[in-house]
Image: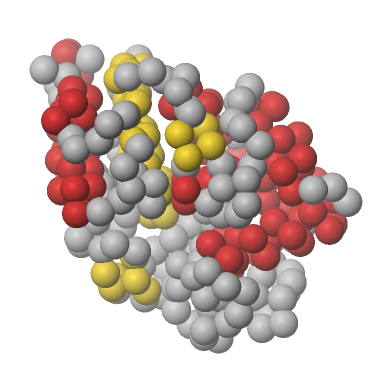
């Protein structure tokens, strides 16, 4: 049985998924063109747009852009001290990792001001159109408001794995931990010490518990969303997993996601 077939046993009404094998083959489950609300996987789109903005001179990752001295790099890695869902500071910048969707909205507004266009238009020109993605218009938050399909996300992961939209040096920096010693709470999984994060994707590191599998390497990166969505890329295993569902994150996902991750990672390459 394919690891993706485990999804048929989950308590969800609709789901779509894909895995990329070490040989580059793509296996899907469900309808890969069906759109789902991404919730916080949206941050992988917004952060890539911010990296493009940095390269073209619209944004400087290391400039202070808000009153507490935080930089775009701080906002992308949840190190700015901004509250999760409101644009106010809970802590000094660069002292602890506070997961903040509001921080992404602050950054998106800054890009919009600098580029003189709505952020949704900038995102489309910088990321969506070049990758051939067809998400619905960004609704609400730049940190949680995108709607897209598995096939859209298959296009997105290529830009996080290869220097398609940005230079390799920028991609390398983006995938490195920003302020590696910061502690913080990983939503749904408790306090992590340290709680590594790159400029957009979450880095697995040695976190436990975690939404990826016990077999995922420390270099695994990706994101999950409160709408029951998850995406990880493991460069050591050479595998990628995308799963979109119509059920909000909860105890079911805490159990199901690590299990399917380990099943994908334990597959024999000869069986792919």
Depth check: give the residue in front, 163 or 41: 41
Work out whether 199 lies above or below 129: below
Which residue occupies 30% across, 51% down?
249
Side of 111 where 176 appears, left or right: left
Q: Position of residue 77 (x, y in %)?
A: 52, 63
Q: Position of residue 212 (x, y in %)?
A: 25, 47
**Along the line of sight, the residue nearer the viewer: 60 or 89:** 89
Quadrant of the frame with the N terminus:
top left
For the C terminus, which image quadrant? Answer: top left
Left of 157 or right of it: where is 224?
Answer: left
Q: Nearer the viewer, residue 166 or 47?
A: 47
| 31 relative to 6 in the view: left or right | right
Q: Residue furthest right?
A: 116
**Relative to 223, is 28 above or below?**
above
Could you say which quadrant of the image residue 26 lies in? top left
**Residue 99: x percent and y percent?**
45, 67
Against 254, is 164 above or below? above
In the image as oriented, which residue stretches furthest toward the left? 1
Q: Is residue 140 visible?
A: yes
- State the residue at coordinates (31%, 42%): 247
């Amino acid at each position: 049985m394919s690891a993706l077939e485990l999804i048929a046993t989950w308590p969800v009404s609709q789901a779509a998924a894909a895995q990329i094998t070490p040989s580059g083959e793509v296996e899907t489950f469900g309808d890969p063109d069906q759109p789902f609300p991404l919730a916080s996987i949206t941050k992988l789109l917004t952060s890539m747009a911010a990296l493009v903005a940095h390269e073209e001179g619209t944004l400087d990752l290391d400039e202070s852009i808000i009153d507490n001295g935080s930089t775009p790099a701080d906002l992308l890695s949840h190190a700015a001290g901004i509250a999760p869902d409101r644009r106010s500071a809970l802590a000094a910048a660069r002292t602890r990792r506070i997961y903040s969707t509001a921080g992404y909205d602050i950054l998106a507004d800054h890009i919009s001001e600098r580029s003189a266009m709505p952020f949704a238009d900038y995102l489309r020109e910088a990321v969506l159109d070049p990758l051939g993605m067809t998400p619905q218009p960004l609704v609400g938050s730049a940190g949680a408001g995108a709607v897209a399909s598995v096939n859209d996300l298959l296009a997105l992961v290529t830009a996080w794995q290869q220097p398609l939209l940005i230079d390799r040096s920028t991609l390398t920096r983006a995938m490195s931990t920003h302020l590696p010693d910061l502690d913080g709470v990983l939503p749904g999984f408790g306090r992590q010490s340290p709680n590594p994060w790159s400029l957009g994707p979450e880095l697995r590191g040695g976190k436990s518990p975690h939404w990826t599998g016990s077999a995922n390497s420390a270099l695994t990166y990706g994101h999950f969303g409160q709408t029951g969505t998850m995406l990880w890329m493991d460069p050591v295993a050479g595998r990628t997993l995308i799963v979109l569902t119509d059920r909000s994150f909860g105890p079911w996902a805490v159990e199901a996601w690590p299990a399917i991750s380990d099943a994908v990672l334990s597959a024999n390459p000869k069986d792919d």
